[in-house]
């Protein structure tokens, strides 16, 4: 939720008047005034419009009730060690309240194939699975291609796994794996006999756009575990 102090601080970073913010967010100046005076808290839609207006000018609201400039950046992770660092980055986002079941930034994964994770991460993949499970209440949604795939027994049984799987409807997204986590989009490339290449775009707007696209497909997708053709993977 946006606080009155955050809103004033964000306007200060851009030297915006209330009228300028109102125009950018498609709300009334009176609404801006009332939020800043603490008369009422903005509704979810209004808050999202305000966030989007500031994000378009590289200003974001932080979880500690602050604001900051945020320029889009690109990170690159390469090889097995880079892959581990990528999983650490994902974990840091999964620790945040926004990644919880009631949060607004679930982790969204497309074209998941954990054979690649096993191959390049080895036991570190299981370590990551354990630590995420221990966090509790983390929301990870996975779209997979039709066909057999590995999963944890508790995920298949619906008794405590942290990932939920659905079939990618009509292979709508394609077969290039990607992660949306926090305000980041990761494109993952696994070529035969090559080290993994992971490119991460750090952009709230890009992440939001991909998450919205993913959610449309997620709603149209069918659950995986209604069919008995899955291989189990135990956390060692």
Image (spheres, rainbow, N blue to C red):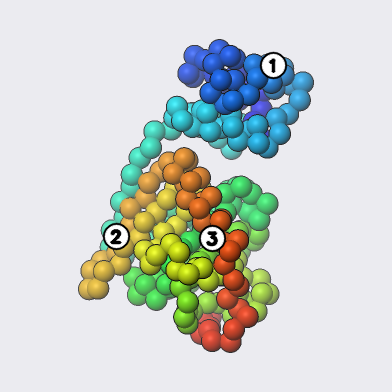
Is 189 displayed left or right of 127 in the figure? left
User: Residue 197's mark?
Assistant: 2
Of labels 3 and 2, earlier in sequence is 2
Q: Position of residue 231 (x, y in %)?
A: 51, 85
Quadrant of the image occupied by residue 71: top left
Label 1 element class: helix
The residue that mark 3 highlights is 217
- Most extreme residue toward the bottom, as rendered? 228
The residue that mark 1 highlights is 30
The residue located at (51%, 81%) in the rendering is 233
Q: Position of residue 80 (x, y in %)?
A: 31, 65
Q: Position of residue 176 (x, y in %)?
A: 36, 63
Q: Quadrant of the N terminus?
A: top right
Q: Position of residue 197 (x, y in %)?
A: 29, 60
Of labels 1 and 3, earlier in sequence is 1
Of labels 1 and 2, earlier in sequence is 1
């Amino acid at each position: 939720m946006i606080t009155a102090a955050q809103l004033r601080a964000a306007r200060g970073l851009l030297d915006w008047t209330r009228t300028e913010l109102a125009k950018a967010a498609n709300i009334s100046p009176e609404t801006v005034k009332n939020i800043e005076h603490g008369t009422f808290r903005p509704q979810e839609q209004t808050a999202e419009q305000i966030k989007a207006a500031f994000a378009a000018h590289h200003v974001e609201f932080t979880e500690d009730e602050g604001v900051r400039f945020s320029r889009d950046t690109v990170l690159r992770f390469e090889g097995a060690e880079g892959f581990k660092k990528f999983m650490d980055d994902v974990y840091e986002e999964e620790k945040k309240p926004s990644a919880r079941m009631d949060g607004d930034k679930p982790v969204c994964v497309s074209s998941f194939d954990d054979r690649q994770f096993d191959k390049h991460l080895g036991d570190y993949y299981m370590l990551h699975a354990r630590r995420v499970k221990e966090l509790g209440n983390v929301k990870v949604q996975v779209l997979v291609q039709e066909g057999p795939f590995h999963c944890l027994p508790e995920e298949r049984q619906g008794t405590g796994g942290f990932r939920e799987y659905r079939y990618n409807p009509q292979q709508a997204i394609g077969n290039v794996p990607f992660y949306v986590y926090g305000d980041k989009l990761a494109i993952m490339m696994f070529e035969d006999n090559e080290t993994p290449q992971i490119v991460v775009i750090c952009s709230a707007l890009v992440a939001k756009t991909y998450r919205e696209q993913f959610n449309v497909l997620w709603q149209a997708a069918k659950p995986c575990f209604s069919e008995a053709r899955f291989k189990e993977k135990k956390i060692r």
